[in-house]
Amino acid sequence: MTDGARKPTRRAVLRGAAGVAAGWAAQAWADAGTASAWPAWEAFHRQFVGSGGRVTSDAQGQTYSEAQAYALFFALLAGDRERFERILRWTEDNLCAGDLTTRLPAWLWGQRPDATWGVIDDNAASDADLWIAYALAEAGRLWNDRRYRALGAVLAARIVREETADLPGLGPTLLPAPRGFAPEGGPWRLNPSYLPLQLLHGLAGATGQPVWKQLAASSLRVMVESAPQGFSPDWTVYAGQGFQVEAEGKDKGQGAYNAIRVYLWAGTLHPQAEGRGPLLRALAPMARFVRERGHPPESIDILTGQAGGPAPSGFSAALLPFLQASGEADALRVQQLRLEARPPRPDAYYEQCLALFGQGWMDGAYRFDADGRLLPRWKAGP
């Protein structure tokens, strides 16, 4: 998996993000009791998801496992079982050679140099795998479907076998991929945005395997300790005795298109979720930055706090739950107004995703309980 190849998929935005005020919430969920009554999901599906369940997220017509994973989760949020199954089937048939029980999804699919279409890179991406396993486990629970539960359990077990390592001083830790990030003896390159605590806690409950609690504990440390000034990095390096700023690549020492998700995941944690308090406290400087500047930075030096220009408005959508959880009511309203004044483009995949997550949460489209179980609006209670 090449990090540089994935970057273009991070530039994107949601259709008409205006729905941040109460009036939008009423429009976005015209009928809270009806599955699939979520116009934002319908717009996303029309823009990016083909009739066969493939998500096309860039100008080259390529498909990333992350895009399949997010679409699967959004379909579950909408209670859209038919599309959930279609997206899952395409993912299994094309990224897993027809069998999700025997291999992790390839992270990149598209047109190859010989003009044929298929898997371009068969390495996996653990963030996508984690979201797929979680979506399957929760779909199995919410729809009482044994097949989904079984697939989720098998994929979760494979993630543990192939995408984790027992790092010295840190314990079992989720790696970004099966290959390329865990040289013998280290150092290890990690991505804090791949580590949403609610998913790790949820899979701990769904699988009954203690290793998922251990992964949650190490993930909390990665997110907190890699952000010494309160700004999460896109990537961090763990050398066995603490975290170091990444010294290579154009994004060295920066928090940008990956890191924005760390604040998003932190903001959507249940108030009683384990780790929420320490994480919000560690990231509080970003909330203050947004309050003082009136916008999130597109990129920021995680040590000096020197920021680039204003981020696209999808970043504002991602920060809404975080600002609310941080008690920043004024900053929250400013970001809502920013979204209303400058809605993101309808064809920008990544920010569309950020807005579905962030604005969907603000609308009450979904919640997570303290143990990481999904509480979609269409089905009250666990």
Image (spheres, grey):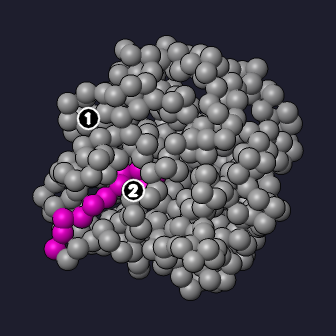
For the record, the magenta segment spans 185-196
Q: Earlier in the sequence, mark 2 or mark 1?
A: 2
> Residue 58's spot in the image, x, y percent?
59, 52
Considering every residue shown, the one lying at the far bottom of the view is 102
Q: Quadrant of residue 165?
A: bottom left
**Label 2 vs label 1, nearer the camera:** 2
Q: Quadrant of residue 190?
A: bottom left
Residue at 35%, 22% in the rendered image: 289
Considering every residue shown, the one lying at the far left of the view is 241
Q: Is residue 186 left or right of residue 222?
A: left
Residue at 78%, 32% in the rendered image: 28
* Mark count: 2
What is the spatial separation of the Cα atoms under label 2 and label 1, in whole angstroms?
Answer: 19 Å
Please state, as top left, top right, bottom left or bottom right, where the N terminus lies in the image.
bottom left
**Residue designated by label 2:** 4
Considering every residue shown, the one lying at the far front of the view is 114
Residue at 48%, 73% in the rendered image: 121
Q: Quadrant of residue 187?
A: bottom left
Q: Secondary structure at mark 1?
A: strand
Q: Nearer the viewer, residue 129 or 248?
A: 248
> Residue 149's spot in the image, x, y percent?
66, 72
Q: Is residue 66 above or below residue 365?
A: below
Residue 111, can we see it?
Answer: yes
> Residue 188's spot in the image, x, y percent?
24, 64
Q: Is residue 353 above or below residue 318?
A: below
Q: Nearer the viewer, residue 375 or 186?
A: 186
Residue 296 on the magenta span: no
Q: Amino acid at mark 2?
A: Gly
**Residue designated by label 1:** 301
Q: Secondary structure at mark 2?
A: helix
